[in-house]
Amino acid sequence: MSSQNLKKTDVIFGLCHTTDVEHMLPGGVCKTNEEKFVVLKEVIKKDPQEIINEIIDSGLKGRGGAGFPTGLKWKFASLSPEPEKYVICNADEGEPGTFKDRDILLKVPAKVFAGMTMCAYCIKAKNGYLYLRGEYKFMVPELRKVLDSFHETIKKLGYDFHIDILLGSGAYVCGEETALMESMEGHRGEARNKPPFPTVEGFRNKPTVINNVETFVNVTMIQKFGVEEFKKLGTQDSRGSKVFSVSGDTPKPGVYELELGMKLSDFVDEYGDGDTKAVQVGGASGFCVPRKKFNDTIIGFEGIPTGGSMMLFNSSRSMYNVLTNYLEFFAEESCGQCTPCRVGCQQLIRGVRAVKCGLRSPDYLDDLLKLTASMKLTAKCGLGQSVANSFSSIVSNFKEEMIY
Amino acid sequence: MIENLTKKYGKSREALIPILQAIVEKESYLSEEAMNEVAKKLDISAAQVYGTASFYSFLDTEPRGKYVIRVCKSIIAEMKGKKEIIKTLENLLKIKVGQTTPDNLFSLLETNDIGWSDQEPSMLINEKPYTNLTPEKTISIINEYRK
Ligand SMILES: Cc1cc2nc3c(=O)[nH]c(=O)nc-3n(C[C@H](O)[C@H](O)[C@H](O)COP(=O)(O)O)c2cc1C
Ligand code: SF4
């Protein structure tokens, strides 16, 4: 069954052309390197302020999960008079159920590097880094090849910007922007206090723009097609399209690009197996939506925002198993720096197990819900703060499964 | 070797993790001697080197085999038959998760999501991903490494 309301797009992966999106400019497939970076060539003739204003006007929000307006982030970094600034592409992609950045980097890496260069041009940075999760080390030889020809092209254009690849070492929390910078500086990946934000004090304490892989590609495509074309996709609050990682109980797991602002029920019609009980939107740190709410749930910044992880569960699955798997994940990946998260994650695991085996009464779940609410307020970084999302949405929607 | 690595990556604190990653790539893990030597070369304390290494799951400070197998244990992997893959590997290698074969060829570990939820069950052997695993496929992959 194919949903009529789901709008498939091909902005991110389409080479220089688009498929379903007829109103976007035709272009043909790029073959040579010069062609790949042809947009870039035009962009670095423009006034940086104009580019930043275009990105702000486009309404583009970060695709890594938090959804901060990309143009504003660039503007803040551009305002600093500091001569040394950095651009970082966050390719740590550690959220369970996410794999879209993998495909973007495998299929259209040139678009990522072009977007990073546009950012460098806007904020006046000379160095950029691709922080690639250690699990994706297998991609490095191919990425280096693309980078080599990229650096060649850049030189021909008479522009000075260099991108290096740095590898992670298997720590989910390093996807958090300040933990990532700590790791790049050779330290344990422990999140920093914010403020100061990275646009003020980031890598090496210098102004830094850090964006998700997909965010940079969107910038490249906005520069290619123009702001107005980009704004035709999505909704008022959620401009553009999004690359989704679809997994779990689905006949067609994979990477799909869809317009933002879709109804979850339309998504399930297309990707479900006919027996979908729940969808976990946004990975372990996201929200679990039960079947009865599919119709009222919008995927986008006006509803549930997501980095793109969509895990489908059918009625044969135990949501208790899903929850404990997530909790174990958080407990293992907590950096241990702050007490609410370090102790809280352990308490939650012990708590749900105690309720399940009858050592504690079902009312104890309410205490655990309060614990996650306080973690949301007091944990130092997004890891500890977001445990509440999956915990409360699973426990409140599937309470019977937690008890019996 | 560490001499060469400091030539390549420098001696600043920022060089620490790339150096440790390169040692792990060569020797599968970080021995105490290796960590001490890195500390000396970068002029930081051994505790700082150890403290940093121990934070990262891929910077092993325990001896590991030549091939480190990391099986994904995400909820999706679990739903798609991860348990069977672990059982297959345990029987084949005659070790349990967390252990290394006596000939030091294989270590068997579990790890969090490795970015292949669309093709579970999956595993990494050193840096190479293997996906859509079945018990038969797993056996033939391991046999290739044994050759
Ligand atoms: C625990 C944790 C893990 C994160 N992992 C990632 C990641 O793998 N990739 C990513 O782009 N952002 C990740 N983020 C979000 C980043 O901190 C940051 O907001 C993002 O890179 C900004 O880019 P964007 O505005 O383009 O989304 C993570 C955040 C937290 C709290
Ligand atoms: S919330 Fe968790 S991961 Fe974040 S700083 Fe605190 S302990 Fe570390």
Image (cartoon, grey):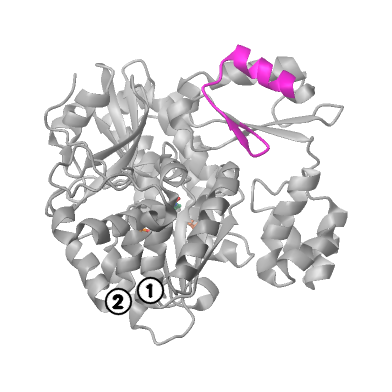
Q: Residue at x 27, y 70 (%)?
A: A72
For the question of whether residue A179 can be seen, the reply is no
Q: CA distance from mark 1 to mark 2?
A: 7 Å
Please name the residue shown 45% across and 31% down the image: B117
Q: Nearer the viewer, residue A352 or B135?
A: B135
**What quarter of the picture does the C terminus of chain A occupy?**
top left
Figure quadrant of residue A298:
top left
Residue linked to disc 1: A121
Crowding around mark 1 (Cα neighbors within 10 Å: few <14, some 14 to 19, many 20+) is many
Q: Quadrant of residue B53?
A: bottom right
Find out whether the residues at labels 1 and 2 contact each other: C-beta distance under 8 Å.
yes
Q: Is residue A107 left or right of residue A147?
A: left
Q: Which residues are magenta?
A: B124-144
- Say whether disc 1 or disc 2 marks the residue closer to the N-terminus: 2
Q: Is residue A55 magenta?
A: no
Q: Is A23 left, or right, of B46 in this rendering? A: left
Name the amino acid, label 2: Pro
Residue A111 visible in the snapshot: yes
Residue B136 to residue A157: above or below: above
Asked if residue A216 is positioned above or below residue B27 in the image, the reply reads below
Element type where label 2 sits in the image: helix
Residue of label 2: A48
